[in-house]
Structures are given as C-alpha cells and as structure tokens.
Image (cartoon, rainbow, N blue to C red):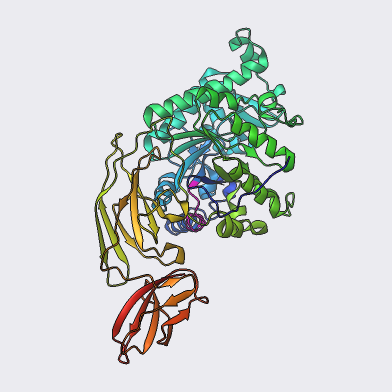
Amino acid sequence: MVIGFLPAASQPKHEIRATWLTTLGGMDWPRNKATGAAGIRRQQQELCDILDSLKTARFNTVLLQTRLRGDVIYPSSIETFAESLTGSTGRNPGYDPLAFAIEECHKRGMELHAWIVSIPIGNARQVKLQGRNSVVQKNKKLCKLHNGTWYLDPGNPESGAYLSSIVREITTRYDIDGIHLDYIRYPEQGERFPDRDTYRRYGNGKDMEQWRRDNITAIVRRIYIDVKSIKPWVKVSSSPIGKYRDTDRYPSRGWNAYRVVYQDAQQWLKEGIHDAIFPMMYFQGNNFYPFALDWKENSNGRWVVPGLGIYFLSPREQNWPLDEVVRQIHFTRQWHLDGQAYFRNRFLLDNTKGIWDELKENFYTAPALLPPMTWADSIAPSAPTLPRMQLLPDGHIHLQWQAGTDNGNQPLKYHLYGSDTYPVDTDHPQNLIDTYLTSTKYDYAPALPWMQKRYLAVTATDRFGNESTPLALNAPSETDVPLLNKGDAVCLPEVKGAQSIIIRTVMETEVCRMKYTQQFSVEKLPEGFYLVRVADAEGNALFEGTILK
C-alpha cells in the first residue's frame, strides 16, 4: 500500500486527541495512595500534574478507567472501591476521585469519558479481596469462570441490566462527557466460554456464534438507549479489537473482533447505537492501514479514532521505532479519520522514544476542537454579544462578553480565537488560542508567541459540539498603531528628536534596545508580536508601532 503524507502543520480544526488513563494497579494513576489527608492531596496533585501535561500538549479527551474489575473509583451503591486508590480493596479514599477528575479536566478544557471494563469481573485474587462485595458473591448466577478469570455471562439478559445499572449511576450522578466501553466482548478462546447452559435456555434456535454476537450487541444497545435517555449529549463509544474481520485488502490472520470474540462493532455503527469507536489498532504495517480504512469506510458517519499502541515503543515491549507511530498519525489525518488515541498515558508522559516531543512540536501545535455530534443535535447556539476589552495594570487584557443561548438549555462553553488580520478567521485551526472556556470572562495573557494576536474573537459551543458564529472582541480603528514590518525588514518614519528604538513584548518585557535608525531587521527575534517605541533622549515616546515576526 502506498502512503502519502501531509505536512504535520496541516492539522485539522476538529480532531479527537485522547489518552487512556489506566487506574488498574495504578499503572497510570494513582501512584500515591489516599490513606489520609496528606495522601489525598498527593493523589490529587498527581492527577493535576498529569492533566497539566496533557493540556500543554493540547489533548482534549481523557478516557479515565472508572470501572476496573468489578470495582470502581467512585462511591457506588452497586460495586466497591478499587484497591488502587488506597491499597486496600473496598476502602473509601476519603474523597470522590471521579468527581475530582471531571472537575479538573473541565477546568483545562478537556472532556472526561468514563472508561468501563465491561465483561471481566476479576481473577481469583481480585474476587477474593472483594469478598462479599464481589459480583461473584452478590450475583453468582450472572458469572462464569473461564481460564482462571471471572466474567459476566453476556448470554444472560440480566448481565446487560447489571452493566446498564452501573452506567446509569455514573451518567445520572456525574457531569461526564462520555461512556467508553472496554472489553465489551467475549474473552480470548471465546469458543470455549462455558455458556452452553445459557445457550440452551436463551438461544432460541440461533446459530451459537451469531447468538453470542447478538448478546453483546443487545448489551451495547441497552446502554446506548439508557445513556441517551438521561443525557443525550453524553457520547457512547467502545474500544473494539482493532481488526473487525478479514478485508478485501488484507486478511486478519485469525485474530479479529467478529469471529473470535463475537464483537460486531460495525453493526453498532450501522445501527446507530454508538457515537464513536476507538479500535485497538496496536499493529504495524499492513496489519494497521487496511483495517483502519475498513473502519472508516464502515463508520456510518460516526467517529473512528484509531487507538495507537505506543506502549510497543518501549524496549521492554516490542521496541518499535518512533517512525512507526508517526506514519500512523500521518495516515489518520490523510484519510480524514477523526483523531488519535494513545495506549497508554504513562508511555506518553515518559516521552517513550520521543513520542511526547513529536506530538507537541509537530502534530499538536495548536488546540483542536472535538467534532460536532450532528446526528444528535445540529443546531448551533446563538453567538455571544456585548464584547468588552480592558487593559489591566499587569499587562493582561481582560475580555468579557454576554453569553449566547442554546436550544437545549444547557450551559455553553466558549472558544477564543486570535489573528493578525481582521476579521479573525475562525475556520483556521492555527487561530485557536483557548478552548472550552466555562466563563464569559477571560484574562488574556499571551505568554507564548503563537498567542500574541492583534485581533480576537469568541464563539459559543453547546454540549454536542455545535459552534456559533463569531463575536469580534475588537476591530481596526483610526487609533490602531501601525504594523511596521514586511517580513524581517522594518521601516520607520522620520521622527524629529528620535534617539532610541525600544522593542517590547505585549507583556511589556523589553527584548531589544538600539540607536534610532529608519531601517533595521528583526531576523534574530523569536516569532511573535512586538511593540515598538521610538523615544527621545529622556525616554519619552515619540512614535509607536508594532512588529509581527
């Protein structure tokens, strides 16, 4: 297969940038145990540090493992607390980790999707530690032991009801942005799963393989309908096996979702009981590209976000070269898939083989918005109104606007754009400055060169991702200081009494001072937006202008 690449800078405005944050065993979080007030603070700070890092790399989605193996990371009336929070199964950590994580994600303009490990409910050790609170002890008739691990029996209709009760509890109580179903399938060696008795009772004469696929689909359908009945904007997704089945382009070589683990994920897309899939495409070469295209071609207009196996970059795993993942990211953009997801978070933050640097410096150079979920709601909110800008003594600019309105009566969020031309082009992804703001007030502190813009605009967005028309926060006027350069060459007018030229950032930090001359070059300045002052011998301003490098 021949693959052409687009420049990394040609990033789309809408792109899902997700990471799987694993709580099982504290593999990604938490390393610190919440065994008291100090432990709680350390555990919370650890998560904040992770989210701050993701924010700097302009990620917008966190898939947080919320249900692990028959246990959870929030105070549930159905299942017990996970061991990884405190070091002891069932022990209350003294705060609500899920509520805390949601709040901190939203502060940083990121979505949180509750990652639910669906069918597995624990190995012998985990079930023993959970004791009377284990699913096996409380609902033995729903459970099957297979290869040393306990699973819910998908063929028992009550298993779907049980899983849906957990999902309804989370969706009702928490301001989540998504429910993400993991392991929503039969286990490996699924043909040996001990469900003959269930099949005799509920099979109704169906072929056993199709019956198993229908069982999983029925659970997915129930969860989707239940979530949407509570909060229609909450996204329902899953992480199916990366190869759906053999394609015309390439065989799956025996390991696929449809035949081996009875996971008919393309049917879920066709039926419209999924908003997105994050297929686990932890493969190289022709085991990746043909199957990514197959998901795209059978998406039914829903989102396809390939899961990239960056853990295989580790020398302790398969020691992939970084170029393998880079090519896969290029491919997802060239063929207009809806984003990328990374398994798992620690390999991102550890910068394994330089993957973190690659994303920050080449691929995720500006923020990206999540695509709008138009099949659920396609009506954009009204634009904000009444713009106001105020220069603060510390050099920041205080921005304020009046909220837009939404047909769904849900709180709106806001996207801030900036440009050196007017009007601000809000279709251009490089003009995004900050996203998913929860307030109609914003202190603009352009600390980075790419944030230093002459003109600003704001849009409103609803819970479905529909975006309003922009509100210009400022506009050209006769009092605007002139732009003095074209490229690196600066031309100043003749100014009587001029002695010096002072160049400052918009934060009033002086970066250069020179003797007055009408022409000079800014070739050595870093990229950014600068203020220029021509002063007399006493330092009084005689002329002011701006430079865009």
* Image location (x, y in percent) of residue 325: 66, 49
Q: Does the magenta stretch include residue 487?
A: no
The N terminus: image quadrant: top right
Compare residues 418 and 144 and report the one nearer the observer. Answer: 418
Does the stretch in magenta take in 57? yes
Q: Which of 185 and 398 is in front in this view?
A: 398
| Residue 242 visible in the snapshot | no
Q: Would you say 401 lies left or right of 102 here?
A: left
Outermost residue, left side: 386
* Vertical comparison of 337 with 362: above or below: above
Res 281 visible = yes
Q: Position of residue 400 (x, y in %)?
A: 26, 56
* Residue 535, picture quadrant: bottom left
Per the rendered image, the range of residues in magenta is 50-61
Task: Single out the residue that lies furthest toward the right.
Answer: 253
Which residue does the image show at 57% across and 60% down from the upper left?
361
Q: Residue 375's quadrant in the figure? A: top left
User: In this figure, what is the number of numbered marks?
Assistant: 0
Residue 165: percent from the left, percent from the top? 45, 28
> In the image shown, does 506 or 541 lie closer to the viewer?
541
Compared to 63, does 127 lie above or below?
above
Q: Which residue is drawn at 68% across and 58% down?
A: 353
Place of residue 519 in the rendered image (x, y in percent of width and height, measured from the top left): 44, 81
Seen at 65% across and 39% down, the residue is 281
> Vertically, is 499 above or below 246?
below
- As drawn, the residue found furthest toward the top would be 205
Indicate left or right for 450 with 263 as reference: left
Residue 204: image quadrant is top right
Which of the two residues, 527 or 332, is positioned nearer the viewer here?
527
Is 30 displayed left or right of 451 in the figure? right
Outermost residue toward the front in this view = 494
Q: Residue at x 57, y 28 (%)?
A: 136
